[in-house]
Image: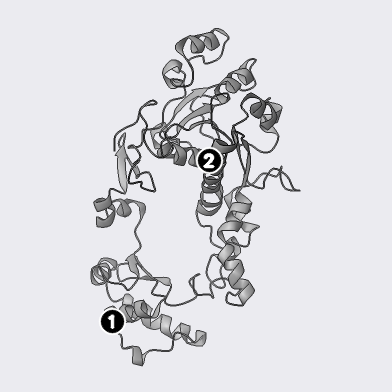
Amino acid sequence: MTSPTPNSRSGPLKGIKVVEIAGIGPGPMCAMLMADLGASVLRINRTVETDLGVKRELKHSLTLRNRDAVSVDLKQAGATDFVLDLIAQADGLIDPFRPGVLERLGLGPQPCLARNPRLVYGRMTGWGQDGPMAQAAGHDLNYIALTGVLNAIGREGQPPSPPLNLLGDYGGGALYLAFGMTSAMLEARSSGLGQVVDAAMFEGAASLATQFHGLVASGGWGLLRGTNYLDGGAPYYDCYPCSDGKWLSVAPIEERFYREFLQKLELDPSQLPDRSQRSQWPALRNLFATRIASKTRDEWAAIFQGSDACVAPVLDFLEARQHPHALARGSYVEVDGVVQPAPAPRFSRTPANMPGPPRSARNEDAAASLAGWMSPQQVAQWQERGLLKPL
């Protein structure tokens, strides 16, 4: 991979142009995903180096990678016209605000689509654009709580376990918005018409759980968390501590994988409780726990290496970067001294560039940041009007 410049991007979304209004969580992640795959994304910051989430050095704000940025006070006179000039040539817009915020700034769907009828207007919210909770504040944990997903994650008899912010913000939010916007852009190529994409993290997380609604309806999934075969209830789908205090993930659901798992543990299947009987799960769990606790995590990893037993060591973020499989595939890259995941997925004919580091929004060189969007003369005109001041 090679580091991209604004006019030398590659990837399947090369040629797509997206205006991103700066936000936190799923909005930047969606923009990163699209930029990673070749789209030219321009971030509009409200203030210099805006980081509305956890404060950190710009180069560590990895979801801001791969795109240029400028700072504009959207309430300043002329700011609406400036953004509309960008929208006039964009394929998509990412709106990270609660319903009505951009409308109050004169940048709602109606004026934007009037300026550019083929624009895909992507709206990222927790609860959606309407409904009784549309204006309520919330975070990832709240959105997945109302879907039933959070209630299903955790140990029996223990509180629900927050799954980082992967299921609401990123799985149910950023991924669904990126997929929705890309789908609408594809449709716009034939119709010539854009549309609004209403991506709610609440609904995206619910969609991710589609399979489990079917299992509940079939009677194959209990509502008590930690008692089912994919939530840690089954002894053959869980994590076990090793002698060094590190952990081993175990997931041999299918019978042939289970037999290999037992063989690697040197356990005789004929002497074990029947795993098809849930009443036997506690006894089986104790046997597995005792056996796995007899060796270190890395000793077990070596024993199971190359097998079909569906066993893997539980790594931390630093260890994950150095795993032989990740190293062999180049799954992580170093950009500006920061190790981070490489763009995914991979494409055989239109591979993505090496990610570029997050870029400053200080307007120090606005003409360069806006290359491909405006001419230097146009940038100068906006500067004369008081926008794009160096900060």
**Rounded to the nearest whole Å, what is the CA distance between mark 1 and mark 2?**
50 Å
Name the element at disc 1. Answer: helix
Q: Indicate the position of residue 345 as horizontal and vertical percent values.
A: 39, 48
Q: Indicate the position of residue 77 as horizontal and vertical percent values.
A: 65, 15
187 vs 131, left or right, is: left
Residue underneath mark 1: 263
Badge 2 crowding class, 10 Å Cα cut-off, few under 14, some 14 to 19, many 20 or more, is some
Farthest residue in the bottom direction?
270
Q: Amino acid at mark 1?
A: Gln
Badge 1 crowding class, 10 Å Cα cut-off, few under 14, some 14 to 19, many 20 or more, is few
Q: Is residue 340 above or below residue 314?
A: above
> What colour scheme was applied to this rendering of the protein?
one colour
Q: Residue at x 47, y 24 (%)?
A: 361
44 vs 245, left or right, is: right
Viewport quadrant of the N terminus: top left
Q: Which mark is residue 186?
A: 2
Q: Indicate the position of residue 205 as horizontal and vertical percent values.
A: 58, 55
Q: Residue at x 48, y 36 (%)?
A: 55
Q: Nearer the viewer, residue 229 or 88?
A: 88
Q: Amino acid at mark 2?
A: Leu
Q: Is residue 179 above or below residue 110?
A: below
